[in-house]
């Protein structure tokens, strides 16, 4: 059974409906700054992500995309600015806000000491659900990501890369979060498995009525999964817009990224780059 039909049968069909004009954005980021020792990673980040929206944060490797995700999710403390979830300030102390979030970590981040179904049911068991009920829920979530029940008894070491990603998605949707974060979900996968993971992101997000942020450098994934995207470079957002605008924009930064060119404003010599960034 496919993901969409399974989740639809469960009644999880709220769909990606954007926020009403009088409601706060699901996620708002204002003037965010983050450093590690003397290294400035993020500066003056501003974002608004609406309810039911699928948003992509894109950029080259090492630009701080995953750091930004961890800041928004409350896993990392920020140095300056603010992050609001449903109009309330997020911080590392806000367990109530973090409970609304499900994260698919890069590499899956499965527990090697647990089998597949125990990994999927981990948060459910932590919240006090009975083992029998959690097991049944885990099997339903595995079915939702098109994995057979027999996979539930395997250990993570017995899974392929694509299967690990799907198990990680199953674990994330098990608690039916309001916000889904995907950190490089297609990294290292072959084109067919990449397309399957992209389909799962689209279907699960829409069926749950969730707001999604995907961290990626895969342009094809952005076009398939996202409503809008923001390009991160030099610790700042240098471009943001819809995926339609992304393909037609004359902005030099997004043009270089989309076209995958070695020459452009993101690969200028450092002195010239610093000058351009200061005057942009």
Image (cartoon, rainbow, N blue to C red):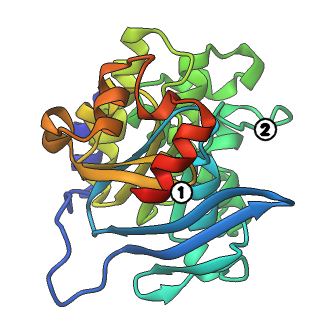
Residue 106 image point, x, y percent: 62, 36
Q: In percent of the image, x 33 and y 45: which residue is there?
A: 204
| As drawn, 76 above or below 173 | below
Please give the residue where the numbered disc 1 appears in the rendered image. 102
Q: In percent of the image, x 24 and y 87: which residue is there?
A: 23
Where disc 1 sits, the SS reads strand
Is residue 6 in view? no
Q: Considering the image in quadrants, where does the N terminus appear?
A: top left
Residue 254 image point, x, y percent: 31, 37
Residue 53 placement, left or right of 68? left
Residue 96 placement, left or right of 58? right
Q: Nearer the viewer, residue 96 or 72?
A: 72
Label for residue 111?
2
Looking at the image, tell me whether mark 1 or mark 2 is earlier in sequence order: 1
* Quarter where residue 192 is shown: top left
Label for residue 29?
none
Residue 179 image point, x, y percent: 43, 62
Q: In percent of the image, x 15 and y 80: which residue is there?
A: 20
Q: CA distance from mark 1 to mark 2?
A: 16 Å
The reply to whether discs 1 and 2 touch (Cβ–Cβ < 8 Å) is no
Q: Nearer the viewer, residue 220 or 232?
A: 232
Alpha-carbon neighbours of circle 2 within 10 Å: few (<14), some, or many (≥20)?
some
Is residue 82 in view? yes
Residue 141 image point, x, y percent: 47, 41
Where disc 2 sits, the SS reads loop
Alpha-carbon neighbours of circle 1 within 10 Å: few (<14), some, or many (≥20)?
many
Q: Considering the image in quadrants, where does the C terminus appear?
A: bottom left
Counting labels gives 2
| As drawn, 82 above or below 218 | below
Q: In percent of the image, x 48 and y 81: which residue is there?
A: 84
């Amino acid at each position: 059974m496919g993901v969409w039909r399974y989740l639809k049968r469960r009644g999880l069909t709220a769909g990606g409906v954007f926020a009403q004009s009088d409601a706060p954005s699901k996620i708002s980021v204002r003037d965010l700054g983050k450093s590690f020792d003397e290294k400035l990673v993020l500066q003056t980040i501003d974002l608004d992500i609406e309810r039911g929206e699928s948003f992509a944060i894109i950029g080259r490797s090492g630009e701080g995309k995953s750091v930004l995700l961890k800041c928004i999710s409350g896993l990392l403390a920020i140095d300056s600015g603010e992050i609001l979830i449903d109009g309330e300030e997020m911080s590392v102390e806000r367990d109530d806000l973090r409970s609304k979030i499900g994260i698919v970590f890069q590499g899956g981040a499965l527990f090697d000491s647990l089998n597949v179904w125990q990994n999927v049911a981990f948060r459910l068991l932590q919240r006090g659900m009975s083992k029998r009920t959690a097991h049944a829920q885990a099997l339903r979530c595995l079915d939702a990501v098109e994995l057979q029940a027999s996979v539930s008894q395997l250990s993570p070491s017995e899974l392929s890369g694509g299967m690990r990603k799907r198990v990680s998605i199953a674990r994330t949707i098990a608690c039916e979060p309001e916000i889904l974060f995907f950190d490089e979900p297609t990294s290292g996968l072959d084109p067919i498995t990449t397309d399957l993971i992209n389909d799962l992101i689209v279907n699960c997000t829409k069926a749950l009525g969730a707001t999604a942020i995907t961290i990626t450098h895969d342009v094809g994934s952005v076009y398939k999964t996202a409503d809008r995207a923001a390009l991160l470079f030099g610790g700042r957002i240098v471009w943001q817009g819809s995926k339609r605008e992304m393909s037609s924009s004359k902005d030099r930064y997004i043009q270089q990224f989309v076209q995958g060119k070695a020459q452009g404003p993101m690969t200028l010599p450092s002195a010239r780059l610093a000058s351009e960034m200061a005057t942009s």
